[in-house]
Image (cartoon, rainbow, N blue to C red):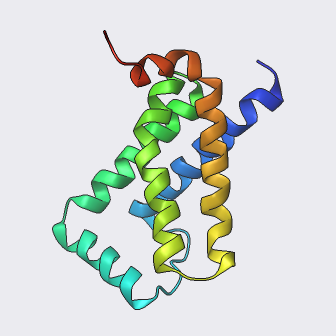
């Protein structure tokens, strides 16, 4: 596999592993959130399990992508998280600058999915 083909998988995997670990260690500063976004994050924190569950899922999925081991599984596991990150920023944190990383993540995810399509395609076909 050449470097250009593996770059989207590695970059997306790094994003998820770094931000997943940051959820536990808080080594990156958390920006100030608008009220609606802060309320949603507060609700996730108050459950006691939701944010740790999401962050562990991000780390595991990111490692699957980063290592290339079960890359299609990593893409499937992280797909709903990628979409939710994008829509969270689209609707709850207005401003084009807040959409740059989520949009990059969606594009990287689409490329990883395209590269894994031969494995993922049966999930989208009906069985007759």
Q: Is residue 22 above or below residue 112?
A: below
Residue that sits furthest to the front in the current view: 128
Choose between 32 and 90: the one closer to the eye. 90
Residue that sits furthest to the top in the current view: 128
Q: How many marks?
A: 0
Q: Position of residue 17 (x, y in %)?
A: 52, 47
Q: Is residue 61 left or right of residue 48?
A: right
Q: Position of residue 13 (x, y in %)?
A: 58, 41
Q: Is residue 49 left or right of residue 10?
A: left
Q: Is residue 51 above or below residue 91?
A: above
Q: Position of residue 15 (x, y in %)?
A: 59, 51
Q: Is residue 3 above or below residue 118?
A: below
Q: Is residue 48 above or below residue 62?
A: below
Kindly identify the residue that appears in the image at 40 percent across and 22 percent down: 123
Q: Is residue 100 left or right of residue 30?
A: right
Kindly identify the residue that appears in the image at 41 percent across and 19 percent down: 125
The N terminus: image quadrant = top right
Q: Position of residue 51 (x, y in %)?
A: 31, 61
- Residue 108, image quadrant: top right
Kindly identify the residue that appears in the image at 52 percent across and 80 percent down: 93
The C terminus: image quadrant = top left
Residue that sits furthest to the left in the current view: 47
Kindly identify the residue that appears in the image at 64 percent across and 59 percent down: 103
Choose between 67 and 44: the one closer to the eye. 44
């Amino acid at each position: 596999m050449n470097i250009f083909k593996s770059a989207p998988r590695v970059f997306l995997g790094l994003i998820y592993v770094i931000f997943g670990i940051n959820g536990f260690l808080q080594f990156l500063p958390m920006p100030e959130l608008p009220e609606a976004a802060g309320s949603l994050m507060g609700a996730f924190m108050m459950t006691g399990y939701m944010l740790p569950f999401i962050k562990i899922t991000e780390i595991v999925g990111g490692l699957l992508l980063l290592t290339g081991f079960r890359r299609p599984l990593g893409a499937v596991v992280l797909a709903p998280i990628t979409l939710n990150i994008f829509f969270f920023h689209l609707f709850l944190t207005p401003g084009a600058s807040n959409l740059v990383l989520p949009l990059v993540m969606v594009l990287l995810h689409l490329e990883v999915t395209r590269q894994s399509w031969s494995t993922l395609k049966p999930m989208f076909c009906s069985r007759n």
